[in-house]
Amino acid sequence: MSLVMPNGNGKFGREITADYNEINYLELDERKKAKLEMWIAKNIGDTLCRHYPNREWGVRVDLEGQLVVITCDSVSAEKGYFMHMAQKNIHDLQEQAKTAAGEILERHGLSRSRGFDADVLETLDRDLRDNVIADDSDASY
């Protein structure tokens, strides 16, 4: 049996020791940068998953280098499309990411349609690193 004791201000219940929802202005810059990178990657990734469903998309963001890398992990986790972030807002990046994703699919002879059958990915020729071998890709690395 547990007892609920007055919390010091005359009310019963637990005293709040920390509010994790408030903005912490003393947060380290590295942590802020990581959160922003994650937010950008999530927004772009959600856009790609809605626009080109049934594929595995990867988005890496480097704020320091002002770079976003789009990968289709169903095809290759090593090769991707590099986009520069300079002078672009999130909407611009999302639109450019859709174009980049379409290019990745076209280079590997995959359909860009929403009704894409993911089983097609299992029939593609792959190298030893499980990357899809495309006609215009260099399979030497």
Image (tube, helix red, strand yellow):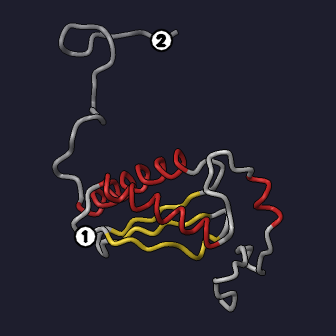
The residue where tag 1 is placed is 86
| Image coords of residue 138 (percent x, y) | 64, 88
Extreme residue in the bottom direction: 140
Quarter of the figure that contains the C terminus: bottom right
| As drawn, 43 above or below 64 | above
For label 2, the crowd category at 10 Å Cα-Cα, with few meaning under 14, some 14 to 19 and many 20 or more, is few
Residue at the image position 74 percent from the left and 73 percent from the top: 130
Q: Quadrant of residue 30?
A: bottom left
Residue at the image position 30 percent from the left and 36 percent from the top: 20
What residue type is disc 2 on?
Ser
* Mark drawn on residue 14: none
| As drawn, 3 above or below 28 | above
| Image coords of residue 120 (percent x, y) | 78, 58
| Image coords of residue 47 (percent x, y) | 46, 49
Circle 2: element type: loop
**Earlier along the polypeptide chain: callout 2 or callout 1?**
2
The nearer-to-camera label among 2 and 1 is 1
Residue in the foreground of this view, choosing between 111 and 45: 111
What residue type is disc 1 on?
Ala
Circle 1: element type: loop
User: Gap between marks 2 and 1, in whole Å?
Assistant: 57 Å
- Please give left or right for residue 80 compared with residue 19 in the image: right
The residue where tag 2 is placed is 2
Residue at the image position 57 percent from the left and 68 percent from the top: 104
Verify CB contact (< 8 Å) between mark 2 and mark 1. no
Residue in the foreground of this view, choosing between 128 and 112: 112
Q: Quadrant of residue 73?
A: bottom right
